Image (tube, rainbow, N blue to C red):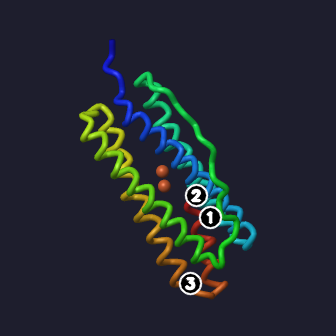
Amino acid sequence: MPLPLNEKVADALNGQLNTELQASHVYRAMAAYFDSQELPGFSSWFIAHSREETEHAMRIYSYLVSRNARVALTGIDQPATDYSSPQAAIAAALETETDVTKKINQLFELAHESGEYGTQPLMHWFLEEQVKEEDLFRRLSDQVEAAKDSRWHLLALDGQLAQRV
Ligand SMILES: [Fe+2]
Ligand SMILES: [Fe+2]
């Protein structure tokens, strides 16, 4: 018999899987917000990021299946559909990432405390990914903050983001 996945860790991984799907949904809603602001570069950037979050969820899904643990999907909360400004939307995105990092840290701690050593490589991957993502979102936040209310600067940034996808 293979060693079963610690139950608390399995629950927490399912929680994280749903958090990633929630983030994916939030970023899709942000894409829609940017489309409503006629900023298609921002929108496609968020669509691409939304897909990445789904991939993160599926990474956990595959891990649970490989450990013969049950995948338990939950409902997804309605995301915000409007923001006071592009800056506010990006600030909310950065906060979403910071939140995810905190949850990954907790999950890492739980895997460690539970002696779930097999789960740690997956957690390492996520820890590294969160460092990259926070950096990415922080840079974008700096850029939109610098654009302030200048439509011209926002459009220039939009063009850059369209090319990054
Ligand atoms: Fe993620
Ligand atoms: Fe992310």
Q: Which residue is mark 2?
A: 165
| Left or right placement of residue 28 versus residue 18 in this view | right
Q: CA distance from mark 2 to mark 1?
A: 6 Å
Judge by depth and name the residue closer to the eye, 77 or 60. 77
User: Element type at marker 2?
Assistant: loop
Amino acid on which disc 1 is placed: Ala
Q: Are marks 2 and 3 in contact (CB under 8 Å)?
A: no
Question: Within 8 Å: ligand 2 and the Cβ of disc 3?
Answer: no
Give the residue at x 66% y 73%: 83
Give the residue at x 62% y 87%: 149
Q: Residues within 10 Å of mark 1 (few under 14, many from 20)?
A: some
Q: How many marks?
A: 3
Amino acid on which disc 2 is placed: Val
| Left or right placement of residue 26 versus residue 36 in this view | left
Q: Which residue is mark 1?
A: 162
Q: Which mark is residue 147?
A: 3
Question: Can you give x and y, in whole percent of width and height, for residue 120 in the image?
Answer: 30, 39
User: Element type at marker 3?
Assistant: helix
